[in-house]
Image: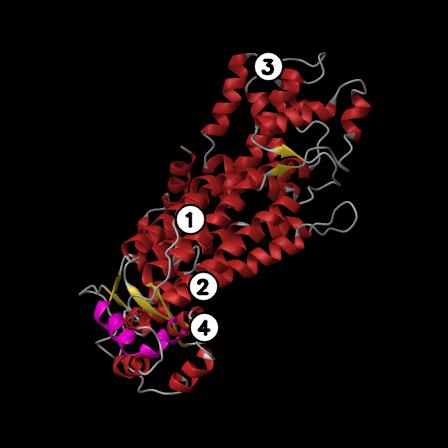
């Protein structure tokens, strides 16, 4: 498997040397956090980029000689298998040989072309070497390799982790749905809710945006140096190159953009980055709310006897998982914003700014994945503090004033809002006794008074919607 090869490549120098390298890594993604996001090296490392480029060059050569112009030479099934087996078994030694070629010629994609031509010579297929990269520009390889890398990361890592997180939030929402809780608007006591409903909001938002995210198509560009199949068409003017390219990219799992410059338009990739940014923003909101619930002791955190919460205060159990997640989500979103805003803009046919930016595509995904795992870890630690939650409700009986004035409106009682405002606004000593004394003094039918006195902060929680 590709992932095991990546791991072997990373750890080939031995554990002690890797630890030394991680201590000297410029980015914490390659140092402190490397083990937590290791799965993304499958898709976003330099090794992965080289391998995906080799894969696209090989698949193009096979397609060209299989269902390209009829007068081209053919590969037999065994030769096709050997080429694909080379891609499957592609290792660090081969990647380094490509890097060596790149160092000599100063071109990364051309180095892949030369590597593949050398491999064909070793197979005894010298007569096929000029069909490698035939009619292509570098971006036909980059703009198919990179979308496939993003697609793979989304399918194999990001989306499954987000769905796991969404399910975990849903599970907590269901477990906590019958725990009444004081709500706050503008930070002030407000109409009660349930702890489960407040957490459930995030499941709903996250699952809704995941549906949007998964509908965004992954597209690629394939059309030569200016997107018009110039070289292809001049060499074989009677062949349907548009149909060939559509079929080829479809076989690779991509939709082809039929009208482009030298580079892909990046619009759907930008949509994906914006979708990731929205999801991350929702999770920032979750982190801050859970952090607040922990700070007011609505949620307690399970502690480990081996962990230290503070270097000075022995009692502390800090909400570090949610704080770390929030910080990394911010870094991810800044990078997603830049990718989404920069990639669709290029001078005329192409400038090179997209190339260096694309090399950082894995950065926001890695910070995002790191955050998702931190939130999952943090949610596993939190438990409701029923005593504090119910005590806060009982200490804020004025919140039932909304319920009382609503029933009074129903009964045609004059100026109910103003009456309840005079009773409760800005007063700290309005409890159950004062509320019931107020109700008893109203000129109302006794049944309505009993209905009003049945309302309490713990049962005035409204409707919990089915999801």
Q: Mark 3 points at which residue?
A: 75
Relative to 156, residue 120 above or below:
above
Residue at the location (66% across, 21% down)?
64
Q: Spatial distance from mark 3 to mark 1, Cα to Cα?
A: 43 Å
Q: Spatial distance from mark 1 to mark 2, Cα to Cα?
A: 15 Å
Mark closer to the chain start, 2 or 4: 2
Q: Name the residue under label 2.
A: 285
Asked if the residue under mark 3 is in contact with the one under mark 2, i.e. CB atoms within 8 Å, the reply is no
Q: Name the residue under label 1.
A: 162
Asked if the residue under mark 1 is in contact with the one under mark 4, i.e. CB atoms within 8 Å, the reply is no
Query: Relative to 333, is 138 on the left or the right?
Result: right
Mark closer to the chain start, 4 or 1: 1
How crowded is the residue under tag 4: few (<14 C-alpha within 10 Å), some, or many (20+)? few
Q: Spatial distance from mark 3 to mark 4, Cα to Cα?
A: 88 Å
Mark closer to the chain start, 3 or 4: 3
Q: Spatial distance from mark 4 to mark 1, Cα to Cα?
A: 50 Å
Q: What stretch is highlighted in magenta?
A: 385-403
Of marks 1 and 2, the one in the foreground: 2
Of marks 2 and 3, the one in the foreground: 2
Closer to us: 194 or 187: 194
The answer to whether residue 17 is seen in the rendering is no
């Amino acid at each position: 498997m590709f992932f095991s090869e990546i791991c072997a490549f990373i750890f080939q120098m031995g554990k002690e040397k890797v630890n030394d390298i991680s201590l000297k890594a410029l980015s914490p993604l390659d140092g402190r956090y490397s083990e937590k996001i290791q799965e993304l090296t499958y898709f976003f490392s330099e090794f992965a980029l080289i391998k995906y480029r080799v894969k696209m060059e090989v698949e193009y050569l096979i397609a060209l000689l299989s269902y390209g112009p009829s007068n081209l030479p053919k590969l037999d099934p065994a030769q096709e298998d050997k080429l694909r087996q080379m891609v499957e078994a592609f290792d660090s030694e081969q990647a380094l040989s490509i890097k060596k070629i790149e160092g000599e010629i100063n071109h990364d994609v051309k180095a892949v072309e030369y590597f593949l031509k050398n491999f064909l010579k070793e197979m005894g297929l010298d007569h096929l070497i000029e069909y490698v990269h035939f009619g292509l520009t570098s971006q036909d390889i980059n703009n198919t390799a990179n979308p496939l890398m993003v697609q793979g990361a989304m399918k194999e890592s990001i989306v499954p982790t987000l769905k796991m997180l969404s399910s975990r939030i849903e599970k907590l929402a269901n477990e906590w749905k019958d725990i009444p809780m004081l709500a706050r608007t503008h930070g002030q006591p407000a109409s009660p809710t349930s702890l489960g409903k407040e957490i459930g909001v995030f499941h709903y938002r996250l699952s809704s945006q995941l549906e949007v995210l998964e509908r965004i198509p992954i597209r690629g560009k394939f059309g030569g140096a200016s997107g018009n199949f110039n070289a292809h068409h001049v060499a074989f003017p009677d062949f349907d190159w548009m149909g060939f390219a559509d079929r080829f990219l479809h076989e690779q799992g991509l939709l082809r953009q039929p009208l482009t410059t030298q580079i892909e338009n990046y619009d759907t990739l930008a949509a994906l980055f914006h979708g990731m940014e929205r999801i991350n923003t929702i999770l920032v909101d979750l982190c801050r709310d859970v952090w607040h619930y922990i700070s007011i002791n609505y949620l307690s955190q399970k502690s480990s006897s081996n962990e230290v919460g503070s270097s000075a205060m022995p009692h502390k159990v800090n909400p570090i998982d949610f704080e770390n997640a929030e910080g990394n989500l911010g870094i991810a979103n800044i990078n997603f914003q830049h990718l989404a805003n920069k990639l669709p803009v290029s001078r005329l046919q192409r400038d090179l700014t997209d190339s260096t930016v694309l090399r950082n595509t894995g950065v926001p995904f890695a910070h995002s994945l790191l955050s998702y795992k931190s939130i999952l870890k943090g949610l596993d630690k939190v438990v409701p503090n029923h005593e504090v939650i119910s005590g806060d409700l009982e200490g804020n009986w004025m919140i039932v004033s909304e319920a009382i004035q609503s029933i009074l409106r129903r009964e045609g009682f004059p100026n109910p809002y103003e009456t309840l405002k005079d009773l409760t606004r800005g007063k700290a000593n309005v409890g159950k006794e004062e509320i019931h004394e107020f109700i008893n003094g109203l000129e109302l039918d006794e049944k309505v008074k009993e209905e009003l006195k049945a309302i309490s902060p713990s049962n005035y929680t409204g409707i919990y919607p089915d999801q």
